[in-house]
Image: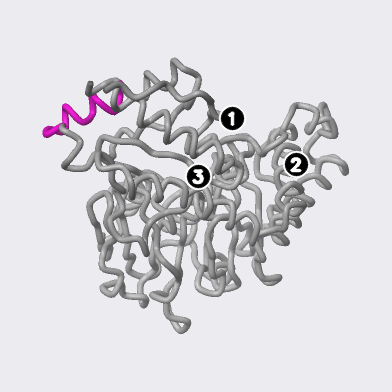
């Protein structure tokens, strides 16, 4: 018996994991205050960047002794600035369980070629055994695996008396999960994730321990200009007060400021996290009652509340990876043609299935409607 086509579509059908949905009620009018045509080094330009830093600190509850800087090249640029500028004095442990953290492992082993490097991996859907990490080493990890839907449950695995630095890619966790900055020497994220800002800019947060390393360590390799955080052995403080290394888009800065103000207006970090939890909860309830789908992340304690990744269950009627990939592609195309959901297919390196962005800018009612369309598409496709 055919499943009836759902009677409603999501008000906002955007479920991409980056760039992500704009905040509820967003329009181009929100950018009317942008300092367009002005230098980012002018007084108004620097004031906008400084406001972005200050509001980020307030909303994320970043300690006052941590530096926050706006940097080029999104979260990727922020992570690589940290890796290339800080690593070298100690051994390095890299924890990788999905595509982007695997990329940081490639940087450490194949690009920087650090001799004392260890890589801890796990397949998509699982988390490596964190008890094997040596915190006398520097440690590189993602808080939330955007392409696998697996996150660390908390920062309890990081000792307070560690000797090495912790470098955390937090891009799909910032504003959505409980980051413990006392355990993070470097944290990075990009605006286009949980806050739905425009792409191309990253944020780099440094603890005093990270600054001490920067000022005491000279990398053995050349550093491109956009990676340089020190001059004559001292931190370039201007980067962390609104003087960016290269020219930022002041239109994108305005968009991020709008998202930060929206986040503050709805109740701050607690409200943003609650929205993510509610959205992910809708998917969780649907999975619990739907026999043909399952979470890719098997352990609820490590399951993301932003990048919720799904895979076909053994009851889906598809046996091979090729059949699963074909079915997922067909269902995504069907729903996109209906205008009921966009960009929610699994990441290209992940197992076949779906990845539904459940960040704070998404509405729970829209997530619920998308699950109805998924039910319809599955029944139509498998007949």
Q: Is residue 323 magenta?
A: yes
Assign the magenta stretch its main secondary structure. helix
Give the residue drawn at x 37%, y 31%.
374
The magenta stretch is 318-330
Q: Which residue is mark 2?
A: 258
> Is 155 positioned to the left or the right of 127 in the image?
right
Pointer 3 with pointer 1, Cβ within 8 A? no
Where does label 1 land, which residue?
Answer: 12
Q: Position of residue 117 (x, y in %)?
A: 28, 62
Q: Quadrant of residue 272?
A: bottom right
State yes or no: discs 2 and 1 in contact (Cβ < 8 Å): no
Q: Nearer the viewer, residue 181 or 280?
A: 280
Dot 1: within a 10 Å radius of its alpha carbon, few (fewer than 14), some, or many (20 or more) residues? Answer: some
Query: Is residue 131 visible in this depiction of the protein?
Result: yes
Above/below status of 26 relative to 154: above
Q: Could you say whether the residue bearing mark 2 is in a helix, strand or loop? A: helix
Identity of the residue furthest to the right in this view = 43
The residue pinned by badge 3 equals: 358
| Left or right placement of residue 209 versus residue 110 in this view | right
Residue found 31% across the figure and 42% down from its top: 290
Describe the element under mark 3 as helix, strand or loop: loop
**Residue at x 33%, y 65% (from the top left corner):** 92
Give percent across and percent down for residue 288: 33, 50
């Amino acid at each position: 018996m055919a499943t009836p086509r759902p009677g409603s579509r999501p008000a906002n059908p955007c479920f991409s994991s980056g760039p992500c949905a704009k905040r509820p009620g967003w329009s181009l009018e929100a950018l009317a205050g942008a300092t367009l045509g002005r230098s980012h080094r002018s007084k108004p330009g620097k004031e906008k960047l400084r406001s972005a830093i200050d509001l980020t600190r307030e909303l994320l509850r970043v300690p006052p002794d941590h530096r926050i800087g706006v940097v080029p090249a999104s979260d990727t640029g922020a992570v690589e600035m940290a890796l290339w500028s800080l690593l070298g004095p100690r051994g390095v442990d890299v924890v990788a369980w999905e595509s982007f953290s695997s990329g940081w492992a490639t940087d450490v082993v194949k690009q920087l070629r650090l001799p004392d490097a260890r890589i801890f991996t796990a397949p998509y859907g699982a988390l490596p055994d964190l008890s094997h990490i040596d915190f006398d080493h520097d440690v590189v990890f993602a808080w939330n695996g955007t392409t696998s839907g697996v996150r660390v449950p908390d920062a309890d695995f990081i000792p307070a008396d560690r000797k090495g630095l912790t470098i955390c890619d937090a891009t799909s966790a910032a504003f959505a999960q409980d980051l413990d900055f006392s355990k993070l020497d470097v944290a990075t994220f990009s605006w286009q994730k949980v806050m739905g800002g425009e792409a191309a800019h990253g944020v780099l947060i440094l603890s005093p321990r990270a600054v001490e390393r920067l000022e005491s360590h000279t990398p053995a390799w050349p550093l491109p200009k956009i990676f340089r955080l020190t001059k004559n052995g001292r931190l370039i403080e201007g980067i962390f007060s609104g003087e960016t290394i290269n020219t930022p888009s002041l239109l994108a800065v305005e968009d991020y400021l709008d998202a930060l103000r929206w986040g503050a207006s709805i109740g701050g970090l607690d409200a943003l996290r609650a929205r993510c939890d509610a959205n992910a909860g809708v998917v969780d309830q649907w999975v619990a009652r739907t026999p043909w789908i399952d979470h890719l992340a098997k352990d609820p304690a490590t399951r993301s509340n932003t990048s919720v990744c799904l895979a076909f269950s053994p009851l889906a009627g598809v046996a091979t990876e090729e059949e699963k990939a074909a079915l997922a592609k067909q269902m995504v195309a069907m729903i996109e043609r209906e205008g009921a959901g966009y960009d929610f297919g699994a990441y290209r390196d992940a197992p076949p299935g779906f990845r539904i962005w459940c960040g704070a800018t998404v509405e729970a009612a829209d997530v619920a409607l998308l699950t109805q369309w998924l039910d319809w598409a599955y029944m139509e496709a498998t007949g």
